[in-house]
Image (cartoon, rainbow, N blue to C red):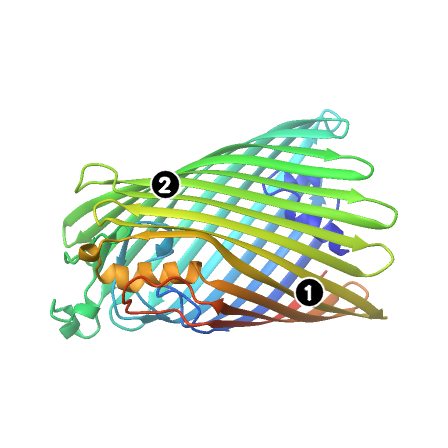
């Protein structure tokens, strides 16, 4: 499969009707090992991590149906993570935490299925899909959380096709459940005098308490509505999607027979994606755009109202140029990120905006039956604006361990470098590839520092990955 065709398949559409828009069959599997380490991180990120993954993907036709499926298993070993005894804690206000860093061992499974068919001479399109995730996460030094997570999300689309134009309406709904239990192997660490081992209930950006609870539940529901539009012309192909969603996540902490709900977090999101392909005799030009906006707030049961507010806007632009005379792909990227978080009770507020342009090149050559590909690129992240407001009297453990290092990371000037090499061996019904990649992030100007934090990010982060690919 050529690079332009693969990009169209990957970015052309994300909703279930994509299985009917892609006029191709494709299957691939991969085994990947990744190692990341370096001090350029927040306190809630791993000091080092090793990840092994197995992925398999297929798109085919069967008795009038278009079927698409993807499976992924990831094994993660993460070291040195602090202020985290839950899953994805940086995305929500309510979670368990503790001061002492720990090491995690995670297993994650994910299955994505899509399918669709057409009626009345391909004028009526019906498609559906389901996403299912199961995860088990555990930390192996005190305090030791054991977490179980599942998510099931189902989707449906109905639309019509007239000539080169396709329009399909979308609806999706699902729920998720995260359950955790925290204990100490060394019972001496249960004492409130062992402060760095104490379980902290975080309830916002700087709000927390040390009330003794050992288990929690986090039920989450989400609903989405949207639309897909596609145009398939002779020289121009375009796909655009707009999806609005609303989620609600309740945090329940328990000990013995006592159940307490500190609060519920609600978030509304809007996401728009677009992918354009323009074909000319000398070249093929492709452009991808992805816009994400979110607006979240909580209902804190202690204050009987909203206390935590979070808004974010992320914009990604990618431009791909493929000259027909050369096996070459040039890519230009632009990433814009603006975030704002406020906790009224703790009088904590910070916001930042940064812009990250980048360039990369991919060049291939063949000595039949082998193909060689070299990948090289880089980028630079520039802070555009930044604000932090935390009165001296309100600065606490959260400020020093979480807010200060996070703010410093996102306000730093960072250079990104990337290099890779792939060897692809073709057989009669199978192609096998080996891809080696290296990524490096380097701080060229340190970010803003608030007060005297307990943890400060470093200047470098390196990531190595080795992938064995099977195309069949």
Distance in Å between CA atoms under marks 2 and 1:
42 Å
Name the spot of residue 82 as percent of width and height, x first.
31, 67
Q: Quadrant of residue 458?
A: bottom left
Dot 1 falls on a residue whose secondary structure is strand
Q: Is residue 176 visible?
A: yes
x and y percent of residue 71 in the render?
56, 56
Q: In the picture provided, is 352 more to the left or to the right than 356?
A: left
Reading the image, the residue beneath label 2 is: 296
Residue receiving disc 1: 470
Query: Which one is nearer the viewer's eye here, 269 or 447?
Result: 447
Residue toward you, 323 or 20: 323
Name the element at disc 2: strand
Relative to 61, 467 lies left or right: left
Question: Residue 223, percent across and down?
Answer: 44, 35
Tell me the quarter of the image containing the N terminus.
bottom right
Give the total number of marks visible in the rendering.
Answer: 2
Rendered view: 34 above or below 179: below
Q: Is residue 400 left or right of residue 378?
A: left
């Amino acid at each position: 499969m050529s690079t332009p065709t693969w990009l169209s398949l990957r970015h052309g559409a994300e909703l279930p009707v994509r299985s009917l828009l892609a006029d191709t069959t494709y299957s691939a599997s991969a085994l990947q090992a990744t190692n990341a380490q370096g001090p350029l991180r927040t306190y809630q990120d791993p000091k080092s991590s090793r990840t092994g993954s197995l992925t398999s993907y297929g798109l085919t036709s069967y008795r009038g149906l278009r079927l698409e499926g993807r499976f992924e298993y990831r094994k993660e070993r993460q070291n040195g993570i602090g202020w985290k005894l839950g899953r994805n804690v940086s995305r929500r206000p309510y979670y368990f935490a503790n001061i002492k860093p720990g090491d995690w061992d995670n297993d994650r499974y994910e299955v994505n299925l899509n399918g669709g068919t057409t009626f009345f001479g391909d004028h009526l399109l019906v498609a559906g899909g389901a996403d299912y995730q199961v995860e088990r996460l555990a930390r192996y030094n005190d305090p030791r959380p054991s977490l179980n997570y599942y998510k099931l999300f189902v989707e449906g689309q109905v639309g019509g096709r007239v000539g080169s134009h396709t329009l399909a309406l979308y609806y999706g709904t699902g729920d998720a459940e995260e359950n955790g239990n925290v204990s100490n192997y060394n019972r001496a660490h249960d004492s409130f005098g062992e402060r760095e081992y104490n379980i902290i209930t975080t309830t916002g950006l700087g709000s927390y308490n040390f009330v003794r609870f050992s288990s929690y539940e986090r039920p989450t529901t989400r609903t989405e509505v949207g639309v897909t539009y596609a145009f398939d012309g002779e020289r121009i192909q375009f796909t655009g999607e707009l999806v609005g969603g609303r989620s609600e996540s309740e945090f329940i902490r328990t000990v013995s027979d006592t159940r307490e709900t500190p609060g519920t977090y609600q978030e509304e999101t809007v996401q728009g994606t677009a992918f354009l392909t323009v074909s000319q005799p000398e070249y093929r030009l492709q452009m991808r755009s992805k816009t994400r906006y979110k607006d979240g707030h909580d209902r804190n049961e202690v204050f009987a109202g909203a206390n935590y507010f979070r808004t974010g806007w992320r914009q990604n632009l990618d431009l791909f140029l493929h000259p027909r005379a050369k096996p070459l792909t040039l890519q230009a990227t632009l990433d814009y990120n603006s975030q704002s978080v406020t906790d009224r009770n703790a009088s904590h507020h910070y916001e930042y905006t940064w812009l990250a342009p980048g360039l990369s090149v991919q060049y291939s050559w063949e000595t039949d039956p082998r193909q060689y590909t070299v990948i090289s690129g880089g980028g630079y992240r520039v802070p555009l604006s930044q604000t932090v407001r935390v009165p001296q009297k309100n600065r606490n453990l959260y400020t020093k361990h979480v807010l200060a290092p996070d703010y410093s990371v996102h306000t730093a000037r960072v250079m990104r470098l990337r290099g890779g090499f792939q060897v692809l061996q073709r057989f009669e019904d199978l192609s096998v590839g080996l891809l080696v990649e290296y990524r490096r992030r380097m701080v060229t100007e340190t970010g803003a520092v608030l007060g005297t934090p307990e943890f400060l990010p470093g200047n470098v982060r390196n990531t190595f990955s080795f992938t064995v690919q099977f195309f069949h």
